[in-house]
Amino acid sequence: MHAVFRIHEKWRHGLLLYWMFERLTSILAKIGIQLHPSVIYREFTSQAPAPEIGLPDCTWEFAAAAEMQELAQVPAYGISLDELYERLGERAECFVLRHRGSIIAFTWCQLDGPPRPRFGLTFGPKDAYLFNAHTDPAFRGRNVLPFLRHQLYLELTRRGRTNLISSTDIFNGPAHRFKRKLGAVPVEARLYVKFGNRIEKVFTLRRFPTARGPEVAPELAS
């Protein structure tokens, strides 16, 4: 009965295919095969009004290293403190939203650091990679994350980062809806394949014509 309930919950939230594919990839990983199908998005501030947040008394800023302990304790996050510090060591930054002093949502970005061949991204002076957004379940449904993401766009633009790239698993329907709600446009659908430590390939499954623009990174627009 537990398995049936879990399948129903995944289906209800539009995550059944995503969950099933994750189970498949976890099995393949045990024999040294990694598969990661994804859609690369370009994100930017659009002409539409900024998302409104249904919550008073909020502030937003980049988190300091000393705040990683609090970040790791946000409900339903599930990323270890060691991994958070590892991200900081690779020069990633976390943009947080606080409600009355407590972190309730956040999203990560990387402006510099090692190349990300899986996504075809080698960082240039105008590039930023956005990833791993999360909201405390108690505050979902209040437009918290779209609001925070928009504020991050503004902050990155002020820092000269106008080519904002993100990646979403092909089967993650809610994440695709979130991106499109913000006005993000798809660039490419890609499949990353790795066999053991020897063979690593990225295949372009589809290029989306709507993604072309003056700020798209050359390696993504080619």
Image (cartoon, grey):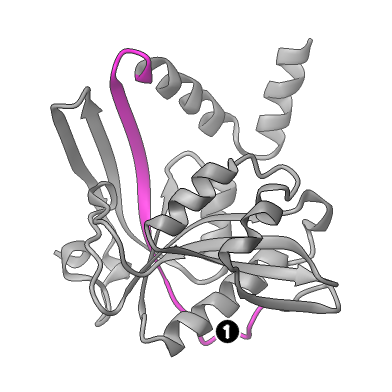
Q: Please state which amino acid type lies under the numbered disc 1.
A: Ala
Q: Is residue 45 visible?
A: no
Report the side of 73 relative to 184 (left or right). right
Q: Position of residue 126 (x, y in %)?
A: 29, 79
Q: Position of residue 115 (x, y in %)?
A: 24, 56
Residue 103, relative to residue 27: is it above or below? Answer: below
Quadrant showing the C terminus: bottom left
Q: Position of residue 63 (x, y in %)?
A: 60, 68
Residue 14, relative to residue 123: is it above or below? Answer: above
Residue 56 is inside the magenta segment:
no
Report the side of 3 relative to 88 (left or right). right
Report the side of 113 relative to 220 (left or right). right
User: Hey, which quadrant is residue 90 in on the image?
Assistant: bottom left
Residue furthest front as drawn: 66
Q: Residue at point 26% right, 79% down?
A: 125
Q: Position of residue 156 (x, y in %)?
A: 45, 80
Magenta segment? 29-51
Secondary structure under badge 1?
Answer: loop
Report the side of 193 relative to 174 (left or right). left
Judging depth in this view, the residue of 138 and 73 nearest the camera is: 73
Q: Residue at point 71% right, 42% down?
A: 76
Residue 122, relative to residue 60: is it above or below? Answer: above
Q: Is residue 185 visible?
A: yes
Q: Residue at point 36% right, 20% down?
A: 29
Quadrant showing the N terminus: top right
User: Hey, which quadrant is residue 221 in on the image?
Assistant: bottom left
Count neighbours of disc 1 (C-alpha within 10 A) and say few if under 14, some if 14 to 19, many if 20 or more: few
Residue furthest top as drawn: 1
Query: Residue beneath label 1, please?
Result: 48
Judging depth in this view, the residue of 193 and 175 nearest the camera is: 193
Q: Residue at point 20% right, 42% down?
A: 202
